[in-house]
Image (tube, grey):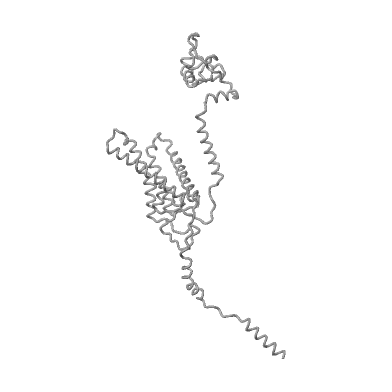
Amino acid sequence: MDRQTLVSSSSSTNRGNSISPAPPEDAWVNTYRKLLPRWKSLTGSNQSAIPIEISRVNQVDAERLDIEMSAMLKEQLVKVFSLMKPGFLFQYEPELDAFLEFLVWRFSIWVDKPTPGNALMNLRYRDERAVEVTGKVRTGLEGPGLTIAQKIWYCAATVGGQYIWARLQSFSAFRRWGDTEQRSLARRAWFLIQRIEGFYKAASFGNLLVFLLTGRYRSLIERALQARLVYGSPNMNRAVSFEYMNRQLVWNEFSEMLLLLLPLLNSSSVKNFLRPFSKDKSSNSAGDEALCPICQATPTTPFLALPCQHRYCYYCLRTRCSGSLSFRCSRCNEPVVAMQRHGGSFNNVTQKE
């Protein structure tokens, strides 16, 4: 009895632990094909591609870095011709700028590489026309680079267009097309140039507003060519330190403040205020007493400032007294109330106006 019970229990256990047969290899594919139309019908109308967001600050910084790089190259190239006669490169400045812009384009965009500024900001150009949105776009790395036609048109617009426009402006200004004495044809051409320039600036301003809103196409050339800046690498830190940018901003604000305050300061008053703290007392020597304290030359028509009786040039003393009613002597800081010809009598005293 016990043996039969054990045999029956073991057989039932083996039947319970038996492995079910594996599904066919194309079962997942068939299931996917069956469910895909239903999934599209449910979510196709509501699902949309997630638009990528390229940092606007990075794009603007990249453009600024490219400008600074071109300026550095131009400065080094100008030093090569420093021994030539002055003004030699001034008449060929548009050609020099076009040559440098062509070099940057030739060794960056033409060979499918980013410009120096774009490389520092981890950006590259993408042909937006060739991008097909088939799902949720998250990285912004999809899409091919620019085509050969886009590269050539980019060079023609940035290098050739800017060169022709700069030459046209300089030629029209040199020929004075805008003068009233010129012929009607020249004046019409001048007004046409001004109209085109105004229209271009207005269009650039409108493109800037659209760029700030959408983050696409920072210039009209990029918008016309559908050349969009996207990220070049998914994992790359910002190459430009924020500490450097903060220092640059502080220095710019400080320099602007100085440019605002310096015209309001009186240089002679500042010198007189700092004179007691100066360690150099040579200005009070006998040799310096014979010189005009303003122009530091021997007065041809010497006049004395009253009441301190320090000697000045007539023109220097007269202009200072006329320019400021509270003029003080540059040597002793005493208020000058009148001026007298050196060696003259008291009747020759001239009161300040």
| Residue 64 on image: x %, y % | 47, 45
Give the total number of marks visible in the rendering.
0
At 50% across and 17% down in the image, what residue appears? 312
| Residue 196 on image: x %, y % | 35, 43
User: In the rendered image of this protein, does residue 223 appear above or below residue 279?
Assistant: below
User: In the rendered image of this protein, does residue 132 appear above or below residue 167?
Assistant: below
Task: Return the residue nearer the eye: 345 or 115.
Answer: 345
| Residue 348 on image: x %, y % | 48, 10
| Residue 7 on image: x %, y % | 68, 88
Task: Return the residue nearer the eye: 63 or 212.
Answer: 212
At 52% across and 28% down in the image, what residue appears? 265
Q: Residue furthest right?
A: 2
Image side of residue 156 versus residue 289, left or right: left
Residue 329, quarter of picture: top right
Task: Return the residue nearer the eye: 68 or 247.
Answer: 247
Q: Residue furthest bottom?
A: 1
Residue 191, quarter of picture: top left
User: In the rendered image of this protein, does residue 144 appear above or below residue 102?
Assistant: below
Q: Quadrant of the N terminus?
A: bottom right
Image side of residue 138 versus residue 165, left or right: right
